[in-house]
Image: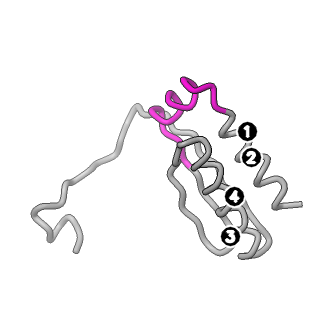
Amino acid sequence: MNAGTNPSAAASGPQEGLPTLNWRFEFGSYAATRHFLDQMADLSKREDYYPNVSFGKTYVNISIDAEGRAALAERNSSFTGEMEALAATERT
């Protein structure tokens, strides 16, 4: 059921003015994609931060909104650097 047919669903429009960081990581196989996702899950648990993630067979999209950036900065987290390093390892 979608918001058009479900009276209890909350409608949401575009979120303007909220800066978002976006990454798209491409991989050569599903196995490499899955391994990266597993490592990202471990990183998220360790850092207690869970970004927005979408993925397909050979890619992963990750988004961090302004609120998430503020939370990571407050903790002086190296989350994004570690995430990029994990992706680089999988692509080599």
Q: Residues within 10 Å of mark 3 (few under 14, many from 20)?
A: some
Say which of marks 1 and 4 sits in front: 4
Prevalent SS, magenta region: helix
Residue 62: horizontal and vertical position, in percent?
58, 52
Q: Residues within 10 Å of mark 1 (few under 14, many from 20)?
A: few
Q: Secondary structure at mark 2?
A: helix
Residue type at the position of mark 2:
Glu
Residue 46: horizontal and vertical position, in percent?
62, 45
**Disc with the residue nearer the chain's start (3 vs 4):** 3
Residue 18 versus residue 35 in the image, above or below = above
Residue 2 versus residue 84 in the image, above or below = below
* Magenta stretch holds residue 49: no
Q: Which residue is mark 4?
A: 39
**Disc with the residue nearer the chain's start (1 vs 3):** 3
Number of numbered labels in the structure image: 4
Say which of marks 2 and 4 sits in front: 4
Q: Which residue is mark 1?
A: 81
Measure the C-alpha gap from mark 1 to mark 3: 19 Å
Q: Please provide the residue range marked out in magenta.
A: 63-77
**Disc with the residue nearer the chain's start (2 vs 3):** 3
Residue type at the position of mark 1:
Gly
Q: Quadrant of residue 56?
A: bottom right
Measure the C-alpha gap from mark 2 to mark 4: 11 Å
Residue type at the position of mark 4:
Gln
Q: Which residue is mark 2?
A: 84
User: Pointer 1 and pointer 3: residues touching (CB < 8 Å)?
Assistant: no
* Magenta stretch holds residue 74: yes
Please tell me the numbered disc located at residue 18.
none
User: Pointer 2 and pointer 3: residues touching (CB < 8 Å)?
Assistant: no
Q: Which residue is mark 3?
A: 34
